[in-house]
Image (cartoon, helix red, strand yellow):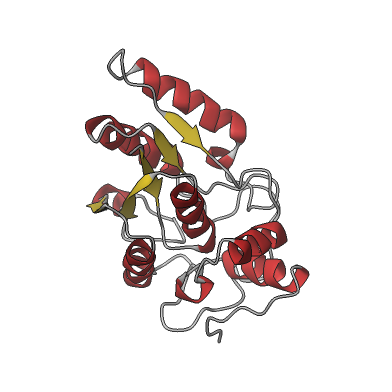
Amino acid sequence: MKKAVVILSGGMDSSLCAYIAKNKGYEVITLHFNYDQKTQKRELKAFYDISKKIQAIKQIELNLDFFKNMSGLSLIDKKTAVQTTGIEEGIPNTYVPYRNGIFLSIAGAIAEQEDAEAIYIGVVEEDSSGYPDCREEFIDSIAQTINLGTKPQTKIKIITPLVTLKKEDIVKKAMEYQVPLELTWSCYQNSLKACGVCDSCRLRLKGFSKAGQKDQIDYL
């Protein structure tokens, strides 16, 4: 069977990507990165829960500890608070420099080693927080770079099935694919109950509200 590497944070978007890949007939290899983020343990639980649900043929967990040496990153630095006063304009303080570029480069190496023909990543351009490494033109560029930097017979597609969708469309599609959204985690700053006020929580709650659905995870 054909294989795909799915970059799976354990959030709603990446979990939907895993289900889409499975539905498209791929054997799924799930890939998760620990980068000393504040909700690392909770994201990891979601990763393994979703990987089990989709019967991933391999689950890969990697540590990228170098990120903790970057000061002032609100997702990592305990001295820097996550923005909680509303969805920010421009690039928010939750941006981690070139994170998706690093993730995709590593995923490219794994895809070549595993003879996978696709990488799935749940980037969302239109209704996300404005990260530069979520743009479709960036993804296209790094896909070209990965294929230039691998063996001639290696042909890897980076598939971004959610990139043009709004959050409410993602919620609806997740319902359609029967994604267990109650197992996913999106919050940037809490691990037991989602804060409900960080950018990620606000976007998630807005998506559920506009889709006419109720989010089943616990919020403070």
Q: Residue at x 55, y 30 (%)?
A: 138
Q: Nearer the viewer, residue 203 or 3?
A: 3
Whole-percent x, y for residue 210 in the image: 77, 68
How far across and how far down the image is residue 144, in percent?
A: 46, 20
Of residues 15 and 2, the one drawn nearer to the viewer in this rendering: 2
- Is the residue 116 above or below the residue 187 in the image? above
Look at 40% across and 44% down and name the residue there: 26
On the image, which quarter does residue 216 sit in? bottom right
Residue shown at 54% from the left, 27% from the top: 140
Residue 215 appears in the rendering:
yes
User: Residue at the location (52% across, 49% down)?
Assistant: 122
Picture coordinates of residue 5 (x, y %)? 36, 43
Query: Going by the image, does 95 lie left or right of 33?
Result: right
Q: Position of residue 151 (x, y in %)?
A: 27, 16
In which quadrant of the rendered image does the N terminus lie? Answer: top left
Question: Does 89 sit above or below residue 102?
Answer: below
